[in-house]
Amino acid sequence: MALVSFKGTREGLSITLGEGVWRDVLNELAAQLGRPSAQSFFHGARVLLDTGPRAIDVIELEELIALLSQHGMTLTSVIGGPNSQDAFEQVRATIPPPPETFEVEPTAEIPAALPADTATAMLIHRTVRSGQRYRYSGTIVIMGDVNPGAEIIAEGDVIVWGKLRGVVHAGASGNDAAIVGALVLAPTQLRIGGYIARAPEERGRARSVTAEIARVREGRIVVEPWSGL
């Protein structure tokens, strides 16, 4: 049986998970959703997930929801064993509605500790939840967390005074000199200009509480302690 299979239904798109290592299944799903010929087909789909005999836990389901959200897809129901159903009940309150795109006027209300060039940044005074998508032609400053499944796209820098756990793209217009900084830097996907990186596996390993900054150095994205905060 394939690791992932798709079927169209009246209610939307049915995705069935096969047997195998979870990371392999998730990578196969990402590859299928990322095919250029499929992106327009999948975008906006409502998804029925069939886990079969596989028992999915909350963390795995959150990872899958975040991946679907990157492609504009919404998980609406889960068919499977009791463990999968329990996980779905625990996370269903965080499942996003159809993706929202926000355009916000710039503001000068920026904390003095931030770089001076953020004076005309988009300032977001809230947690950015799964399924929400912010895009701005300059720098974005978020006074709160960015949850898994959320997406932040800025042509300038991205500064998060909280936990960054969603998808982030700084320098979206091709500015490789842009930065991404956060009190906790653990994005699902990190892009700066034309460079892309994924966060390493963090399960079972304590993260540093030091604020971190990501930037492009010598042709790759590097993450280091951010002494500027």
Image: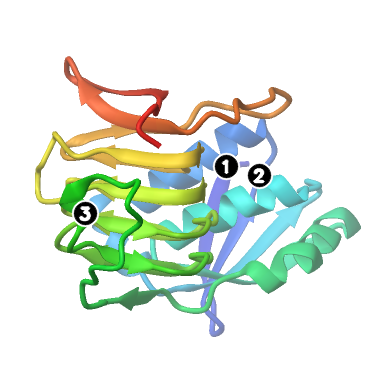
Mark 2 lies on a secondary structure that is loop
Percent coordinates x, y for residue 162 in the rendering: 52, 50
Residue 118's tag is 3
Q: Count neighbours of disc 2 (C-alpha within 10 A) and say few if under 14, some if 14 to 19, many if 20 or more.
A: some
Residue type, mark 2 in image: Gly
**CA–CA distance in space, label 1 to label 2:** 6 Å
Residue furthest toward the front? Answer: 112
Q: Is residue 4 above or below residue 82?
A: above
Return the residue nearer the eye: 8 or 199: 199
Q: CA distance from mark 3 to mark 2?
A: 47 Å
Amino acid carrying label 1: it is Ala
Residue at the image point whose x is 69% and y is 22% from the top: 205
What amino acid is found at the position of numbered circle 3 in the picture? Thr
Label 1 neighbour load within 10 Å: few <14, some 14-19, many 20+: few
Circle 3 Cα neighbour tier, 10 Å, few/some/many (<14 / 14–19 / ≥20): many
Q: Which residue is mark 2?
A: 18
Q: Secondary structure at mark 1?
A: loop
Residue at the right extreme, as displayed = 82
Which residue is tagged 1?
2
**Quadrant placement of the C terminus:** top left
On the image, which quarter does residue 209 sit in?
A: top right
Q: Nearer the viewer, residue 67 or 46?
A: 67
Residue at 90% x, 59% y is 82
Q: Earlier in the sequence, mark 3 or mark 2?
A: 2
